[in-house]
Image (tube, rainbow, N blue to C red):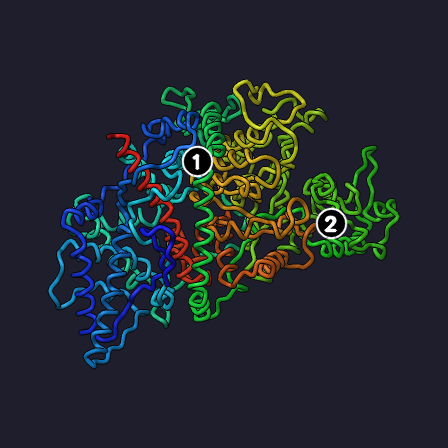
Amino acid sequence: MSTKSTDSNEEITAGIRPTSILSPEWNQQTLFDARNLFHTQFSNDAWQQLHEPQSGKIHKPPVYPNHVLHPEVIPSLNDVSSELSRRSNVHLSDSLALETLETEMPMEIASRFHDELQRAVQNRAAHDRNTGQESVVDLTTNFQNAFRPTKSPEPTDEMNSACEYHHQQSFLTSSLSHDKTSLNEAFQRIKIAGDFHDMSHIEDLEDSVAPLLRALVIREKYMFFSLQSFPPKVANFLSKTLESEDQSRRTSFSVNRPTTEACLNRHFISLTTRAPLEQLDEFECLHAKIQLLKSNNTHNTNETKYGEPELYRPSVIKREDAFNIPLLPSIDICVKPQKGIYCVYMLDEKKEWIPSDYQSVDRDEFMEDYTLLSRMIMDGPLKSFCYRRLQYLKAKFELHGLLNEVKEWTAIRSTPHRDFYNVRKVDTHIHAASSMNQKHLLRFMKKKMKTSGAMQVYKTKDGRIMTLKEVFDELKITAYDLSVDILGVHADRNTFQRFDRFNAKYNPIGQSTLREIFLKTDNFVDGVFFADLLKEVIFDLEESKYQHAEPRLSIYGKSIDEWDKLAKWCVRNTMYSANIVWMVQIPRLYDVYYANGITKNFQEFLANLFQPLFEATIDPASHPDLFRFMYHLTGFDSVDDETKPEKPVITPDMPYPDEWNTKENPPYAYYLFYMYANILTLNQLRKERGLNTYQFRPHCGEAGTVSHLVTAYMVAENISHGLLLRKSPVLQYLFYLCQIGIAMSPLSNNSLFINYNRNPMLEYFERGLCVSLSTDDPMQFHFTKEPLMEEYSIAAQVWKLSSVDMCELARNSVLMSGFSHEVKMYWLGSNYQEPGVVGNDIRRTNVPAIRIAYRYEAFCEELNILSLAYKSRQEVSYQ
């Protein structure tokens, strides 16, 4: 299939990858004809120029320095700010002389060789028909044969090396994947034919590449400092693209553990008897790694009756043992806040306190990066380029669906046992206080009225203690009278664009007293009702087996002992399940606390949030329950109404937290920066002690201004909502390049901010952003006992999602969740961290290799365009 554009030099082709030819002699002659024809079209000089990047040596993995190189040290990116200032409508005038990524075979070589092979097949078939010979050609099985040497005269060594290299790159995943059927089938790709080096048709590319690379470097810095994740593929891309500018020390980074590639390098170095790794040719090194992986998979694992490796199974933690965690000894470390950020001090040989060498980001640096990103998202050429790339990705996915939907269906149908109902799916955004539906809450309240009516549950302001029956008698309501309509906790049309009314829905029957009795952890009954209610919600998840959640518990920052109370509640009630992990949400309510005399300044608010966490990490015996609870905590969330008026940015004249003693609430960026800066220090301290680290996953982009998303792009592992990304193509494209997770809740948004049919979730998904479905508040928005399945079912009906689409969304939810590495290995496959097809196990995810390969190749294409454009820009600047 071929669709020609108006430009004669461009052609969009959906090609079928050739795989096997049933007649060996016929195959050898045809392949030889194709190779010869293809080789004659390239001069030796041209081939050498294209092949030169591929023949470089593999360097040893660089050692990451004690500090990450700031973007300012990259010479060509230093003038991004001034360029944005003086930029007007600039158009490309000359064709760009572009190079190819060192780690990929040039796309034009692969595509042209493929085209010549198809022509040779057609010519050979026509010749056979004319001569009366019969030939049976099957272009849909085993592409590996297309690159094997034939008995016919061989082309040049360079040609064979390139073809073999491309074969190894393309099939590294297939040789290790368990989705064998899908990989052996043809995968119809959409490719751009013509002059691959001429990118003058991509408008504003030259003006956009430097700002985009600068933005990627900024996020990499903040993620690395805080021990949060950054895509290794993007880190390697930045390293290779910017290595000529003193960036050779940059390396890929993964939270808490080396990547499989790094482990493989170390294993390979220790086992190989050949030359040292740095002296090996890139193809030779890759080939040896493939053989090593095959050997490991064959000999070092137990195999099933189908000859495939057994699935990884993590150790099971029993509920009664979940909080029986031994306390670590204390260490000689102290922490002290400086301008709102906790700093760690250690004892030296002279027994004097000295600052640690932990990474840190000061406020001035943050403001500089924030200001630059804010200017980028308003730049005209950059907006145009990002918008066009996003539109291209969306259209490309639609074409992919038309070409490969049947093959994707065939792949998942051939997978035994697995379907959408029994793949792991995580509710990545749900609040514990509203994690049950309204009918569930009603039944629970009626049950407690009948069984615990005489229980003392509430203490009034005047000191009077009331039983549960007395509370309802005062409201003049009996258990028989209660209904979901009287409960009044469900959102309706009156909550649209009214966040104040929505918050009031948390109060059953409009009474804050009932909310405190049934939906709080810190109350007169020590949260026993809330614990029982959550256990019923957890039991429903455990019954479903394949549904999981990350409920948010609240820490308000009103007192220093909040963390201890919450931890004690968790330990006393054994709030553990293999189907959930806990997150903590922090409402941005400093102005309320200050107005009520609860806190004196913003520093006291921060101390209430973070000081107990540092103390429990340094000396677990001082907060034993908190130390054990922190083991099951995965991250922090920042919540509140984003539509509140505020100063949009942090300015140099803003007071530091210890000086912020006014009734004005700090802006969103101020909250997030100081939360991030303290999480950064806490994560480094916990990593040094061998403890788990935390993600920062704030609510962002639901309403308010786009500037909130700029802050989240810098400091957040992933976000919840992200609706406003639809208004900023630059940020949306950056979220795509960095694969930042977005937990979207279309039913919640439908009741509060945007109608369901206008929700951008489908658009984000088609373009390749890492999105997942979540429930937010089942009590307000859902009707069934399986709210996550309700969310999926409505999305599937409205947007006509296929089973593959829903399984991909489920896989995304696991990837962006805070569940442990070992659990994710069990749910997704032991190689889930690897990019591309090798990171997918269809036996676990039910996502076919065709879909994963499409996503990965589209992603690599975007990085390739940026790399080629940047190198071309540098060549022009040097001339």
Q: Position of residue 452 (x, y in %)?
A: 79, 52
Which of the two discs, 2 and 1, labels the residue nearer the N terminus?
1
Q: CA distance from mark 2 to mark 1?
A: 42 Å
In the image, residue 679 lies at what x, y percent? 50, 34
- Indicate the amino acid at tag 2: Asp
Q: Residues within 10 Å of mark 2 (few under 14, many from 20)?
A: some
Residue visible at 38% across and 55% down in the picture: 839
**800 left or right, relative to 69:** right
Q: Which residue is mark 2?
A: 492
Picture quarter with the N terminus = bottom left
572 vs 718, left or right, is: right
> Whole-percent x and y of residue 355?
42, 23
Q: Is residue 98 left or right of residue 734?
A: left
- Residue 513 seen anywhere in this rendered image of the structure: yes
Identified by mark 1, the residue type is Pro
Quadrant location of residue 352? top left
Q: Foreground residue, 149 or 228?
A: 149
Can residue 225 be seen here? no
Per the image, label 1 sits on a secondary structure element best described as helix
> Could you tell me which residue is drawn at 27 percent across and 74 percent down?
137
Tags 2 and 1 touching, CB below 8 Å: no
Q: Which residue is mark 1?
A: 381
Residue nearer the viewer, 609 or 761: 761
